[in-house]
Image: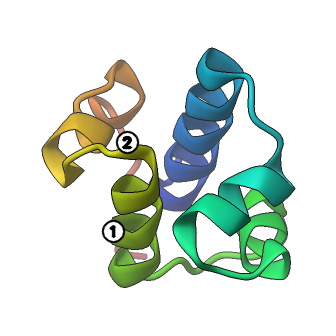
Amino acid sequence: MTVKDATAKRIEQLCKERGIAYNELANICGITPSTIYSIMDSKRRDISLSTVKKICDGLELTLSDFFSSPLFDSLEQEIR
């Protein structure tokens, strides 16, 4: 799994845990819904750390809390 895929799955998990839709997440975080849907699109490969930080701020999480998930424990090599 790539960092981007793990990040999308983590966002999905957090939304399910909190019972919020992606549009609501976007509103809470002050980003556009298209940004969230872009993150969730498996064809898209990039996500900025500043966007992850905005999501964390909206969900009242630290970056450490966000990345403290088994999803990030065994990622595939990004250098090809």
- Name the residue beneath numbered marker 1: 53
Q: Residue at x 32, y 31 (%)?
A: 74
1 vs 73: above or below? below
Q: Position of residue 43 (x, y in %)?
A: 84, 70
Q: Residues within 10 Å of mark 2 (few under 14, many from 20)?
A: some
Say what secondary structure mark 2 lies in.
loop
For this view, does 4 lie left or right of residue 8? left
| Quarter of the figure with residue 64 | top left
Callout 1 amino acid: Lys
Image check: 59 left or right of 68? Answer: right
Q: Identify whether 40 is placed above or below 70.
A: below
| Figure quadrant of residue 14 | top right
> Which one is nearer the viewer's eye here, 50 or 45?
50
Which element is circle 1 on?
A: helix
Q: Nearer the viewer, mark 1 or mark 2?
A: 1
Residue in view at x 70 percent, y 66 percent: 27
- Identify the residue position indicated by label 2 in the image: 75
Q: Amino acid at mark 2?
A: Leu
Image mark for residue 16: none
Say which of 45 and 26 sits in front: 26
